[in-house]
Amino acid sequence: MAVESPNVTSIIVEASEYPDLVRKYQVSGVPKTIVNGRVEILGARPEEDFVRTAIGAADAPDPAS
């Protein structure tokens, strides 16, 4: 998604090199995608499902608000 849209940014983290992030985001499997710091997508998903979930997460209201 980040390749296709300038509105999307992404980072890739090697879990074994960042144990603090593994604990913070409770990584139990890979790939694990965090959208806007609150919605998690665990595992490989078909592209259409992944995009639908990610877009829905981006549109969801922030529960802290």
Image: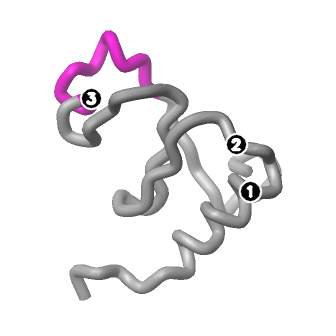
Range drawn in magenta: 13-22
Q: Residues within 10 Å of mark 2 (few under 14, many from 20)?
A: few
* Residue plotted at (50% across, 41% down): 42
Q: Along the horizontal axis of the image, is 18 left or right of 52?
A: left
Marks 2 and 1: in contact by CB < 8 Å? yes
Rendering quarter of residue 16: top left
**Colour theme:** one colour
* Residue plotted at (33% across, 32% down): 27
- Could you say whether the residue bearing mark 2 is in a helix, strand or loop? loop
- Could you say whether the residue bearing mark 1 is in a helix, strand or loop? helix
Q: Which residue is mark 3?
A: 22
Q: Amino acid at mark 3?
A: Val
Q: Amino acid at mark 1?
A: Asp
Q: Amino acid at mark 2?
A: Arg
* Residue plotted at (43% across, 61% down): 39
35 to 64, vertically: above or below: above
Q: Which residue is mark 2?
A: 45
Marks 1 and 3: in contact by CB < 8 Å? no
Q: Which residue is mark 1?
A: 49
Q: Along the horizontal axis of the image, is 51 left or right of 19?
A: right
First in residue order: circle 3 vs circle 1: 3
